[in-house]
Amino acid sequence: MPSITYVHADGTRQVLDVPIGTSVMRGAILNNIDGIVAECGGEMMCATCHVYVEEPYLDRTPAQSDDEKAMLEFTASDRRPNSRLSCQLVVTAEMDGLVVHLPETQV
Amino acid sequence: MADPVVAIVGAGQAGFQTASSLRQEGFGGRIVLIGDEGALPYQRPPLSKSYLAGESGREELWLRPRAFYEKERIELRTGQRVIAIDRPGRRLRLDDGGEIACDHVVLATGARFRPLPVPGAELDGVLPLRTLADADSLRERLAGLGEVVVVGAGFIGLEFAAVARAAGVAVHIVEVTQQPMGRVVSAPISQFYTGAHRGSGTTISLGTGVARILGAAGKASAVETSDGRTLPANLVLVCIGVVPNAEIATEAGLAVDNGIVVDELLATGAAEISAIGDCANFPTRFAGGGRVRLESVQNGVDQARAVAARITGKPAPYDKVPWFWSDQGALKLQIAGLVAGHDASVVRGDPDSGSFSVFCFRDGRLIGVESVNRPADHIVARRLLAGDPQLTADEAADESFDLRAHASRRP
């Protein structure tokens, strides 16, 4: 199972095994990771599952849809070039080792 | 003095969020979250969308896993019903005879489906779609269905119709008004969706009521319409709206008028009793200074946060922009603001392209925007409506006018 590292805003790291086909957002929710709110449940309506993908892994994540790009305008913390909605990061074998940083706030 | 106790009546999205936000706000007292369904608190929107279609499973519905409630010291009581609020005694009475003493009550009781008041509505095969149990029952039956009649062309009925059509079921929708989703969307959006559903093979009869449901051996077999037609049906889905669960508030002497009446702080006439989400009737500038009761995730979640902030000593009037979404097949509808009562509307983009928005105005002021497969407009609209939009109808209709830049100029 691919291993995903969630780095909290205070620097603490949590490493999870997330099944292929499950989103980085759902992996966090099911494992009680604070810092991902996911108010809309993965419908790209709320931008409360915002993460920053650590640079070496950026090109292993799926391309952004227009919907995701639009929603990223609505994040509570700064949007950066490596900003993603974690509901759209469906885990693949290639994403093993992915590191995502959680923003200061989601709402 | 002992730590305060907050009892939350209703373990849907709003109830769950209240408990979660109380802890985030640093509330250290006891939190009891009481829900009358058996399951863990879950998301309702997928019940008429991906869950119904079999594209997602039960565990994806849970708002949080069971361990969350233990970690956050939230006393989750599922399968229990609050039958009365004892105001002088400051306690709740439960259906199993138990009582919960508490300092603050948050009523997040939600709403229940409105039954169809016609003969035959009690037959097997006449079903609502509101709860997880309803969705499970529909999901089980969906595959083997030949013909379905959907009564009511609101969000739920149309979302169900899209899923059923995609599964190869023949769908006939009967709607008593001339305008599907007419209570909450503009005429152009209603007409666009009516055309889209018809285009995918769904039959829609507008201006048509239901006289009775016919059956054989206790099972529904057809719907007799108000204009005398008989529509065969293996299943009749009833989605003609909901009734707010306000009885315990009424019995406790609280004001109830299309929901539990609250003030701008979401407090009832009794300051220690709040009401939020689908069951609450609240004042808002987004309804032209009037009152509304809204059924949406956004409303439940944002009101939960507001009440949690007030209970922890940070009261502020509730003033969030309402937003909604509805997935019907490949057409994602996103609404910002409340469009009911608009006196003018303009279309931005070309409806024939399947991607456009309708901007709705009242007295020259933007009050709501409905977007079909056009999320960027939706996001800009949420920004604009949070402040003073200062957008004219001409600007909205002009695709060369940069809405994003306009929104970033606004405070």
Image (spheres, coloured by chain):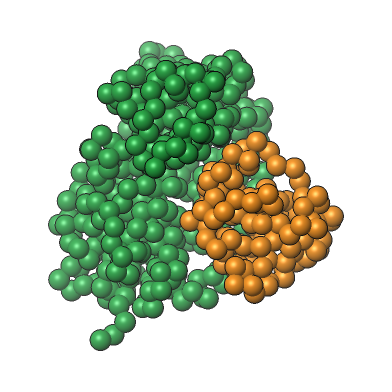
Residue A8 in sight here: yes
**Left or right of A89, for residue B252:** left
Q: How many marks?
A: 0
Q: Which chain is orange?
A: A
Nearer the observer, B118 or B219: B118
> Who's the residue at 44% across and 14% down the image?
B229
> Who's the residue at 17% across and 61% down the image?
B270
State the image coordinates of residue B380 (x, y, percent, origin top left): 49, 36
Q: Which chain is green?
A: B
Relative vertical location of residue B35 with respect to residue B395 in this rendering, above or below: below
State the image coordinates of residue B62 (x, y, percent, origin top left): 56, 58
Check the picture and name the quadrant holding the C terminus of chain B: top left
Nearer the observer, B124 or B380: B380
Residue B190 in sight here: no
Nearer the observer, B5 or B350: B350
Quadrant assignment, res A52 = bottom right
State the image coordinates of residue B150 (x, y, percent, origin top left): 48, 28
> Who's the residue at 69% across and 61% down the image?
A100
State the image coordinates of residue B214 (x, y, percent, origin top left): 44, 26
Quadrant assignment, res A5 = bottom right
Check the picture and name the quadrant holding the N terminus of chain B: bottom left
Nearer the observer, A10 or B373: A10
The residue at the far right in this view is A94
The residue at the far bottom in this view is B1
> Who's the residue at 62% across and 62% down the image?
A102
Quadrant assignment, res B86 = bottom left
